[in-house]
Image (cartoon, helix red, strand yellow):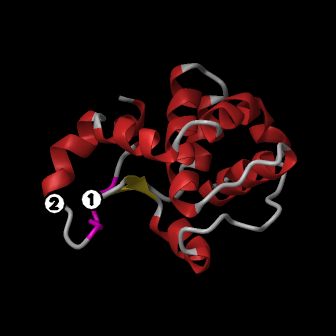
Amino acid sequence: MTMTDLANQIIFVARQNDLSVTNLQLQKVMYFVLKDAIKNDLLDQEVIKETYNVPFQVWKYGPVVRSIYVQYSVYSSDPIIEDGVDTLELAPLNNDILSRLKEDPFELVNESHEEPFWQKNSKKIYRWTSNVEYSLKDVAA
């Protein structure tokens, strides 16, 4: 499992439920679903550690995995039109993914701005991004 697998799972769940997902929304859903998985023991801790292979960074609109953002940046603010991939090991997250996909993306942005790690590091953002990385403990906090 990797963060790419998590992104693909979210896109898959969106498509299966006739929901759209933008790059901004994908980033926030990834963050909160991973956070929920840690807090609610939705996945084995080893699976979580393995999945979190590329860290979130502190960006203007909240946590972002740069490589995944770049991968889907071709869509700009339009919905991602790929099908995603269903991964059995990540299926326990599907209900949480669906719930988060139904939330307003900018409410998720606002919620992410309330996170202690983002607040502590938001002044390090330059031109929308930073290289400040979240540890898994920062995500869980």
The reply to whether the magenta stretch includes residue 132 is yes
Please name the amino acid that badge 1 sits on: Val
**Mark 2 or 1 closer to N-term?**
2
Give coordinates of residue 60: x percent, y percent: 29, 58
Q: Estimate how packed mark 2 is, as few (under 14), some (14 to 19) or many (20 or more) residues with alpha carbons within 10 Å.
A: some
Q: Which residue is drawn at 30% across and 35% down?
A: 115
The secondary structure that most of the magenta stretch takes on is loop
> Is residue 116 rendered to the left or right of residue 42?
left
Q: Residue at x 29, y 67 (%)?
A: 129
Please tell me whether mark 2 or mark 1 is closer to you in this view: 2
| Count of residue discs | 2
Which residue ends up furthest to the bottom in the rendered image? 74
Tell me whether the residue at label 2 lies in contact with that at label 1, contact meaning CB atoms closer than 8 angstroms.
yes
Q: Residue at x 54, y 49 (%)?
A: 52
Q: What element carries label 1?
A: loop
Q: Is residue 60 above or below residue 74?
A: above
Circle number at residue 52: none
Cα gap from disc 2 to disc 1, whole angstroms: 8 Å
Q: In this view, does 70 lie above or below 125?
A: below
Range drawn in magenta: 128-133
Q: In this view, does 72 lie above or below 112?
A: below
Q: Estimate how packed mark 1 is, as few (under 14), some (14 to 19) or many (20 or more) residues with alpha carbons within 10 Å.
A: some
Please name the amino acid that badge 2 sits on: Lys
The reply to whether the magenta stretch includes residue 136 is no
State the residue in front, 15 or 117: 15
Residue receiving disc 2: 124
Residue receiving disc 1: 132
